[in-house]
Image: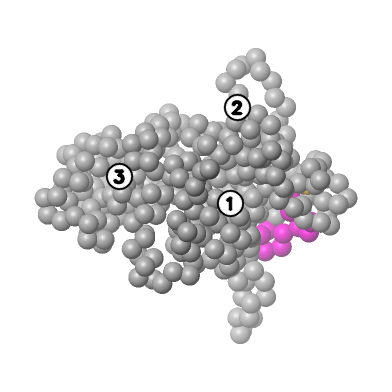
Amino acid sequence: MRKPLVEIKNLKKYYPIKKGLLKRTVNHVKAVDGLDFSIYKGETLGLVGESGCGKSTTGRTILQLLKPTDGEVLYEGQNLVRMPGRELRKLRKDLQMVFQDPYASLDPRLTVGQIIAEPMEIHRLYSGKEKDKRVEELLEVVGLNSYHAKRFPHEFSGGQRQRIGIARALALEPKLIVADEPVSALDVSIQSQVINLLQDLQGKFGLTYLFIAHDLSVVKHISDRVGVMYLGRLVELADKDNLYAEPLHPYTKALLSAVPIPDPLAKRERIVLQGDVPSPANPPAGCAFHPRCSECMEICRKQRPAWKEINGHYVACHLYN
Ligand code: SF4
C-alpha cells in the first residue's frame, strides 16, 4: 500500500470580513472550506480550478505559510498545524515552494548565487567553499551554468528565472514541493521545458509535488492524480487517466471541454460555463456549483453533495447518488 507523505484533514482557511467602527466580524471569506486528501510519496498531485477557487491558499496553508483556521496537516504523521514554531522551522527545509511569478519571488538586489545560497545560510547547512560548490551544482542541475551565479535576476529570461526559483527550492533537499502555477507566466514553448525539468528532478531526487494550475491541459503531462477544486472544496479527485478519460463532475467536464485536442479531426463539444465563480463569502446553498450547472436538479439547490468513492474515483455530485 502506498504511504502518504502528507495527509490533509478537514483543512479550512477563512478570512474574517470586518465592518463598522468596532470592526466587528460580520462574515467570513471561506477560501478553503474543508479539504480531505493525501499526497503520496513520489507522486505529483495536480490541483486545478478557476482563479479564486482556493487552490493557491490550499498550497500555502499546507506549508503553514498561512495559518489554517481549522483542520490538520500531517507530514510523515506529524501535525504541522499544532507544531511549536521551533520544530516547524526545522521541518521547513523538507517543504518548499515554487512560485508563479519567478521575477517577483527573486530579490532583484541579490545575485543568483546569493538567492540560491540564502536558504542554506538560514538553515546553516553549508558554508564557505562548500556552499559555493553547492550553488554551482544546483545551477547545473536546473540547466543553467555555474557562471550565472554572479548575475542578477533581471539578466535572465522568464524560463531561466523559474529555473533559478527551482534551484533555490532544491537547495535544502526538500521532500515536498508545492509548485503554485509555476509555468502560467511563461510562454507556451517554455512551459513544457520547465515541466520536463520538474519531472527529471522528481526522478533524480525522489521529490513529491503538489502542482497547482488553473487549467487541466497544464497538469495533464506531469500529474499522477488530479484534484479539481471549486469554491474552496474538492469536487473530484482521480488518477489522471481516469479523470481525463471519464470525468464525472459537470465542472470537470466543462474544464476539460476547453482543453485543445491535438488531433485536428477529433471533435469535442465545448461546454461554456455560465457566469462567474460566486463569492466565497456567500457560496450558493446546496451544491455550490448549481447556479452554473447544466445538469442541476432540485436536490442540488438544497443539499450539499457528499464526497463519494466510485472505483477509486472520488466525486461530490448528486448525479452519482
Ligand atoms: Fe450539478 Fe447537481 Fe452535480 Fe452540483 S450536484 S454538479 S448542481 S448535478
Q: What's the residue type where badge 1 is placed?
A: Phe
Locate residue 28, reporting x and y percent: 64, 69
Q: Assess whether residue 288 is covered by the magenta stretch.
A: yes
Q: Which mark is residue 260?
A: 2
The relative height of residue 258 versus residue 105 in the rendered view (above or below) is above
Q: What's the residue type where badge 2 is placed?
A: Pro
Q: What's the residue type where badge 3 is placed?
A: Ala
Label whose residue precedes the other's in the sequence (3 or 2): 3
Residue of label 1: 37
Question: Which class describes the residues within 10 Å of circle 3: few (<14), some (14-19), or many (20+)?
Answer: many
Number of numbered discs: 3
User: Picture quarter containing residue 243?
Assistant: top right
Locate residue 30, reporting x and y percent: 63, 63
Gap in angstroms between the C-alphas marked 1 and 3: 28 Å
- SS assignment at label 1: strand
Q: Which residues are magenta?
A: 279-289
